[in-house]
């Protein structure tokens, strides 16, 4: 197993499920080292033939991620260096968002600033009842730089996103659920169990269908509805080329569980 300084990686279910935990105590601040390690794992996950679903979480129950390490921000010497730091964060978030394999984030505590931006880049979001979420950057004299001004309005609507970004207010897990920022709220002790159960429900399906469903959703959101519908047809056509489509239909007709080969 590869050793990381800021992450812990565990593989389950015959390596189909990857559980990646942020481990940068005391509050899981986002450092350059952490981002470097995240990029390495995401690249490996993308190309791994066995890995099919990832759960992204954090060690402990205090914080998922408390935002960028303040000391690293203070060390930046120019606006250009600030922009490079923001680009680094955006690259990681974009890499998560662009994966054809689903990433489930399990938010165990404080999830603010860059941490919330990472969570928003994930495809499904589960949070502990203890979680607090938001974009408090304005309280530090800056703005979100890892995609928060773009992903938050797309998730919860322009007006609600603007309020959170301009005030820097944090919201509880229950309020985040009502806003549409997260999908499920569970008791703290059930967080990982619930994330694994969701992962298993995805894993029982064909990886081919998951891949093209991911692409259709992601690509369709980039443009107008008519372009999204065209992309859906293209993805539907590709799924229909697969052996898994034939197996799925045959299994349904024969009233049995399909035996997908994921091609």
Image: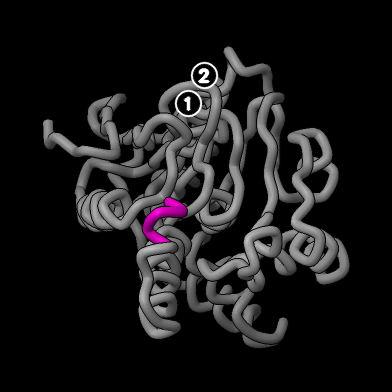
Residue 167 lies within the magenta run: no
Where are the magenta residues, as a range? 69-73
In the image: residue 104, left or right of residue 116: left
Say if residue 128 shows up in the picture. yes
User: In terms of secondary structure, what is the magenta stretch mainly?
Assistant: helix
Color style of the picture: one colour
Q: Which residue is mark 1?
A: 196
Q: Which residue is mark 2?
A: 193
Vertical placement of residue 93 versus 200, above or below: below
Residue at figure coordinates x 75%, y 56% from the top left: 168
Residue 178, image x and y in percent? 85, 43
Q: Which image quarter holds the N terminus?
A: top left
Residue at figure coordinates x 28%, y 42% from the top left: 51
Q: Check contact, mark 2 vs mark 1: CB within 8 A.
A: yes
Secondary structure beneath label 1:
helix
Q: Which image quarter holds the C terminus?
A: bottom left
- Give the label on residue 27, or none: none
Q: Nearer the viewer, residue 60 or 45?
A: 60
Q: Residues within 10 Å of mark 2 (few under 14, many from 20)?
A: few
Residue 40, image x and y in percent? 21, 54
Residue at figure coordinates x 63%, y 74% from the top left: 221
In the image: residue 175, left or right of residue 56: right
Residue 54, quarter of picture: top left
Q: Nearer the viewer, residue 92 or 43?
A: 92
Vertical placement of residue 233 versus 207, above or below: below
Residue at figure coordinates x 29%, y 37% from the top left: 7
Say if residue 263 shows up in the picture. no
Q: Nearer the viewer, residue 146 or 40?
A: 146
């Amino acid at each position: 197993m590869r050793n990381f300084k800021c992450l812990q990686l565990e593989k389950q279910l015959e390596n189909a499920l990857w559980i990646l935990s942020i481990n940068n105590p005391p509050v899981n601040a986002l450092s350059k080292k952490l981002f470097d390690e995240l990029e390495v794992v995401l690249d490996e996950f993308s190309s791994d033939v066995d890995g099919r679903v990832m759960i992204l979480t954090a060690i402990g129950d205090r914080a998922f991620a408390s935002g960028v390490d303040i000391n690293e921000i203070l060390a930046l010497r120019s606006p250009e260096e600030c922009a490079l730091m923001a680009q680094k964060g955006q690259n990681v978030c974009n890499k998560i968002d662009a994966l054809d394999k689903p990433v489930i984030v399990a938010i165990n505590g404080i999830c603010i600033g860059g941490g919330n931006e990472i969570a928003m880049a994930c495809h499904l979001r589960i949070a502990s009842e203890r979680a607090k979420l938001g974009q408090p950057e304005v309280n530090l004299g800056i703005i979100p730089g890892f995609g928060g001004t773009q992903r938050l309005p797309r998730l919860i609507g322009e007006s609600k996103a603007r309020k959170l970004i301009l005030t820097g207010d944090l919201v509880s897990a229950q309020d985040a659920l009502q806003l549409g920022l997260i999908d499920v709220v569970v008791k703290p002790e059930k967080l990982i169990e619930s994330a694994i159960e969701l992962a298993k429900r995805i894993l029982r399906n064909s990886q081919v269908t998951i891949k093209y469903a991911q692409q259709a959703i992601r690509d369709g959101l980039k443009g107008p509805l008519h372009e999204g519908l065209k992309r859906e047809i293209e993805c539907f056509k590709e799924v229909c080329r697969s052996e898994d489509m034939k197996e799925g239909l045959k299994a349904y007709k024969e009233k049995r569980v399909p035996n997908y080969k994921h091609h």
